[in-house]
Structures are given as structure tokens and as C-alpha cells.
Amino acid sequence: MKLRKMMIGGAAAIMTGLSPVAMAADVAPAALIIAQGGLGDGSWNDTANAGFEAGLKKTGIEGRPVESKDVASQGEEIMRRAADGGFGLVISLEWIHGEPMEKLAPDYKDTDWVIMNQTRKGDNVASVVFAEHEGSYLAGALAAQVTADTSIKGINEDAVIGVIGGVKAPGIDKFIVGFIQGAEAINPDIKVLVAYSDSFGDPAKGQQMAKAMFDDGADIVYQVAGGTGIGIIEAAKAEGHYAIGVDTDQDSMAPGNVLTSMIKRVDVAVEDIIVNYADGKFPGGEVMDFGLAQNGVALSDMTHTKDMIPAAYLEKVDALKADIIAGKIDVWDVSTQGYPDFFK
């Protein structure tokens, strides 16, 4: 186990725990680097932080989230400071930190590193990969069925849906491509509007962009934009249409106007990593997969909308889910397969 070294007043203080209740007190503290959009996004960062706090409470080790106004460009500096500051476990939620983490890890062999949503090499690096494309496929399939049913309140005659990503990057396009593929599996002629907000923390811009999509005929918009997505959900409520939430169950943000949410159990992944780290079983050099089969991604329970969705639509989604798990449907993964022709 790593001794818990913390910088106090510029000096390194070594603290040990003796009681059985505090067995993890001799383990170095953990840091969770918050991604773009910051805490309070009601999505990716908040969900991961909930798992982080649960892990700390369960194990008794110390730790804290780390935020930066420019977390993308300062990635190497932030991670290096965390390691130099005595954190024995550094988990980054920021996609852009993957490359610098891979380069830093060999210089900090006593530090355990975790990167999300990509695979990186290193004996002391654990990669956590979610099958967002699989969950998004189901969201697209559901949206394509609902958008064709004008008997549902808020649905127009146009077979048009939309998706708004925070930035154009493989980590975001993985959601978008899966969403499009799922929608086209139901209706090859469906039109899917795609746009990027270039921000994960601008709800006003998200609301404006979603309204524009609704004006262009969409009646369902999938948000993959973190805190910006809060505005997308607000637009759905204001315009009487639907949003699809992401990462966490956002259905209650606008009850009845969030069709479903594509839940990504980053909280489970983070908590699991902390527990293994505290127990001396950090999965260094491993890739941890969380897909439909592992319940790592899923659609929400649709508490506020399930009654208005025809049972046949939900049964179709369940059948598609079973086929994906069984390997009968190959959902395109941008992170490993590059971009498909239909998205270039």
C-alpha cells in the first residue's frame, strides 16, 4: 500500500492509521480531475463525483475533486501537480488528458492513473471504456419510432430528430454515430440534425441551438453536451417537444419533456476503482469495459414518459438491446473503428 503523503504547509506529512475501522488511512489520497463543464453540470461530472464520494466513504481514504477553468489545455500541469502533491490515485474525467497521462505515468510509477472513455498504455494506468455507442443506438431507435407517431403530444409530421454535442471529437461522436445508426435501423430515411455547441458549460447556447432544431422540424433532441445540455432540456420544455438526457437520469429535469436518458454508470466505475485501489488491487494496465451487457450503459426507466410510449416501441428497443448483447447487431464504435462513411 502507498503511504498517505499530503503536502501541509509545504512539508510532506506522513500519516498512518492504526484502528481496524481506518485501515485505509495508510493509503495515499485520491484526486478526481473534473472535466470541462465543471461540477454542477447535472451530468458526467456530477455523476462521477457521486461515485467518487461514495468510494471515499466506503474505504475511508481521503480525496478531493480538482477543478480548473482551463482543464483542457492545462492537463499535464494539473496531473503533474496532483502526483507531486502526494495523491496516490489520479482519476481524470477529461478526454483530452489521455495523451499527456500516458506520457506522465512512467515518471510517476508510485501513482496510479485512470483515464475515462479511451484506452491508454501503462502498467500504472487503468482505462475505463463505456459503450456509449450501444446505449445511444437504443436512444436513436426509440426516438425514430416516437418521431413518427403524431398521436403522441408534441410530435409533428416530420421524421426529423436532432443531436447536439459539446465538441466535435471522437469521444462525443461515439454517442452521435450510435444514435444515428439506431435511428436509421428503424427508418433509413429519417433526418438527423447534428450540431456542436463548442462548450460543456453554456446552457443559454444549448437552449438557443435546440430551439433552432425544433424550428427546423425536429421534435426530439439528444443532448451530449454536459452542462450545456441543461439548456437543451429547458428548450424542450419551453417548446413542448422532447429532449434525451445523457450520462445520468435527467428525466426529472423537465418531467414529461425528457423522453429518456442514456445513462452512463461512471459513478459505479469510479467507486469500483477506489475500492480496488484502497484494497491494493488497482487494475493497472487493464481496460475496464462497461457496456449494455455489464449494465454500464442503459436507457432510463422513463418514469414520466413510459405511459405515453406505445408498448410495441419499448419492446422493439428491448429486442434490439438483446441483439446487441448477443452480437447480432454490430454498433459502430468511432473510438476503435474510426468514422463510418455515413458520418464523414
Image (cartoon, rainbow, N blue to C red):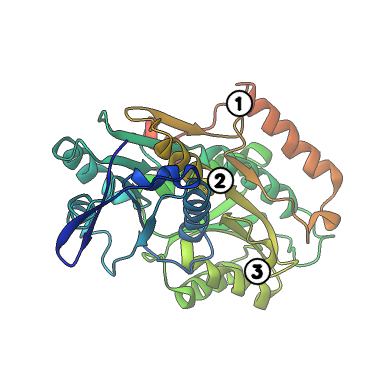
Callout 3 touching callout 2 (CB < 8 Å): no
Q: Which mark is residue 253?
A: 3
CA gap between label 2 and label 1 equals 22 Å
Q: Residue at x 64, y 21 (%)?
A: 326
Closest to the camera, between mark 2 and mark 1, is 2
Q: Residue at x 51, y 51 (%)?
A: 51
Decide: few, some or many residues near mark 1? Use Cα within 10 Å; few <14, some 14-19, many ≥20.
few
> Mark 2 is on which residue type?
Arg
Decide: few, some or many residues near mark 2? Use Cα within 10 Å; few <14, some 14-19, many ≥20.
many
The mark that comes first in sequence, 1 or 3, is 3
Q: Tag 2, which secondary structure? A: loop
Q: Tag 3, which secondary structure? A: helix
Q: Quadrant of residue 165?
A: bottom left
- 338 or 42, which lies in front? 42
Q: In this view of the protein, can residue 34 be seen by the observer?
A: no
Q: Residue at x 44, y 66 (%)?
A: 39
